[in-house]
Amino acid sequence: MLHHLLFYLLPLTDGPLFLAAPPAPTVLSIRVTGLKSDRGWCCLALYQREEGFPTMPQRAWRMQFVPIRNREAVLDLSDLPAGRYAVAAYHDENGNRRMDTNLLGLPKEGYAASNNPRPKFGPPSYEQASFYLAAAPLRLELHMVY
């Protein structure tokens, strides 16, 4: 009796009934080059949306202070869902856990963003720095600017 009911209900669907599995998590490897010294930390902030990018790392989806070795910093993030992201980084040379700026608000410490945009005025936008993370692992290289 049940198989007769399914026979009549199946044409009401667009095709076979399959439950889609959620996308598999993937890995993002971030390498920051061009740091002028091994002093301090490199702050890496991963954003899922425009809010707070790039000047408010506390609003990032994930943020981590990474040690610097041979003037480079490397961070591997795993179990990330597919989606649009942007990365912002700064060289926290004095270890105070914030981006130091001068009286005009210009950075006194090095900074970088994914896609390595170089806007003429102000920080890069989320749109300029964003990328799509799919199921395959992705490697990014950010170049620090002072």
Image (cartoon, rainbow, N blue to C red):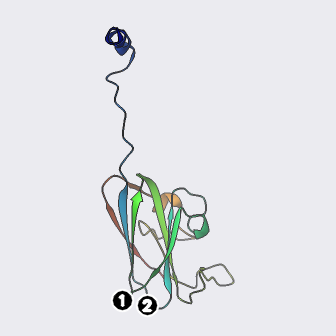
State the SS at label 2.
loop
Answer above or below: position of 67 versus 14: below
Instruction: Give the class, few, some or many, for how many residues have Cα within 10 Å of label 2's Cα (few <14, many ≥20).
Output: some
Residue 102, horizontal then vertical, whole percent: 65, 84
Residue 104 position, x and y percent, is: 67, 80
Nearest the eye: 73 or 110: 73
Q: Amino acid at mark 1?
A: Asn
Q: Is residue 68 visible?
A: yes
- Taking 106 as reference, is 140 left or right? left
**Residue at coordinates 35% horizontally, 52% vertically from top-left?**
134
Q: Is residue 49 left or right of residue 22?
A: right
Q: Secondary structure at mark 1?
A: loop
Assess disc 1: are there few (<14), some (14-19) or many (≥20) residues with their C-alpha within 10 Å of its C-alpha: few
Determine which quarter of the picture holds residue 50: bottom right
Mark 2: which amino acid?
Asp
Residue 45 vs 127, above or below: the answer is below
Instruction: Say which residue appears at 56% left-offset and 87% top-offset.
Output: 95
Is 2 placed left or right of 112 in the picture? left
Distance, label 1 to label 2, CA atoms, is 6 Å
Above or below residue 40? Residue 14 is above
Q: Residue at x 38, y 83 (%)?
A: 72
Mark 2, residue position: 38
| Quarter location, residue 15 | top left
Q: Residue lying furthest front in this view? A: 1
Q: Quadrant of residue 96?
A: bottom right
Let me know if residue 55 appears in the view: no
11 or 4, which lies in front?
4
Indicate left or right for 113 with 17 as reference.
right
Write down the residue under mark 1.
70
